[in-house]
Amino acid sequence: MSNSINSGIYIIMNLVNGKFYIGSSSNLRNRKKEHYKTLKSNTHANRYLQRSYNKYGKENLKFEIVEYIENDDSKLLEREQYYLDIYYGDTNYCYNICSKTGSVLGVKHSRETRLNNSISKGGKPFYVFKNKNFIGEYINIAEFSIDFNISYKRIYSGLKEKGFLLDGYAFIYKDNYSEDKLNEIYNKMTFVEKHILVYKKSTKEFIGEFDSAKICMDFIKIKKFSFYRCLKSKSKSTKGYIIIYKNEYSDDLLNYLYNYDSFENYYKPFYIFDKNNKEFIGEYKSQSEFKRIDTKNYNVNECLKGKVDFCNNFILIYKEDYTEDKLNEIYNRINKYNCTFEVYNKTTNELIGTYNDISLCAKELDIKLYIINNYLIGKIKHIKNYIFKVVS
């Protein structure tokens, strides 16, 4: 069931024995994550639900929404109490420890009580800072993660000093805290947390300055990998935007990026010849024009750059680079081995077959034809798990 409302009553159902836990939340999605995280770490506050998880496994505990409710705390508690009044005390059905609502986990504890309980169970308290300002002391990483919408992994990495957050936060275990330690963390974070400038490439309009990569990624709606790949690329461009670090900015760099065309060669005209007889087939204005006609060709760009000699059954040469000598050079290289060759299994040295037709070999071994040809003429040295030996 899908619903724009993310507030309501839920149950966690044991699919094996039919028992369930009843709860309510103003953020069902986060509450689900919190339950499964604590169950996985064997720290869930409801011992009956934890035992059920340990015995039957996550796959047999299903989180189900019973009723969506507009975000109204009093209404949520009222409806949760309605279901508890029906099922609480029935050991055939209900896992809940407490018969009254008032806490997401069955028993309402003060923050101080929860902190002391966690410490008694071996938890390590930690301090949280935002832009060097003290936010508070915490013991439950999952709780902080949900409340502040920061991933559990990033908080844990910060505490273990494997990395630091990009959102201005610093995390330090209480027993490791010192002012020097805090300054050290923020000095490292300064290197990571560079301000980012964004421009519209088509109009040269300045879009804005962002003080964190996360905010910038959310604005452009781009994934993390693509975002950082863009910042490292020569064009610094993605989705019509130019993205640069503020400390790298200069007027000359920006003008260069406005005029940079990473697809310059993509639109250069080129000739196509039959690789078997050098017959001229045609001229194309761009690679995209050719690919629209022959969509099975995936190596057009590699062929034009000279990384491979032919694409499918074609020789491709940029119009501006074409000479008859160049065509003959490629043709002779391709046909250097009109030969008989044997193929062996590289691991067992077992003979797989003898061939005098590269196309047949490529089809039977499921290897691209140009790869076999490039192996035979010495352009590459290995092909998967095969050894090729020329017989004659």
Image (cartoon, rainbow, N blue to C red):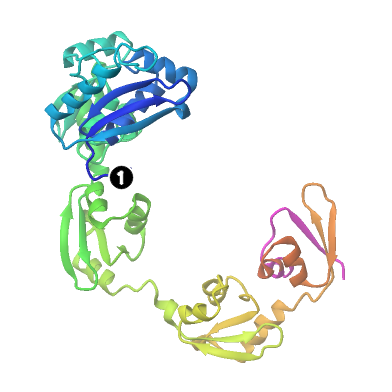
- 272 w.r.t. 184: above or below: below
Estimate the x, y position of residue 382 in percent, counting from the top left.
69, 58
- Asked if residue 216 lies left or right of residue 317, the reply is left
Dividing the picture into quadrants, the one containing residue 101 is: top left
Residue 246 shows up from this direction: no
**In what element is the residue under mark 1?**
loop
- 358 w.r.t. 11: above or below: below
Q: Amino acid at mark 1?
A: Ser
Residue visible at 43% across and 18% down? 52
Magenta segment boundaries in residue numbering: 373-392
381 or 345, which lies in front? Answer: 345
91 or 143, which lies in front? Answer: 91
- Asked if residue 179 lies left or right of residue 62, the reply is left
Residue that mark 1 sits on:
2
- 159 w.r.t. 196: above or below: above
Is residue 382 covered in magenta? yes
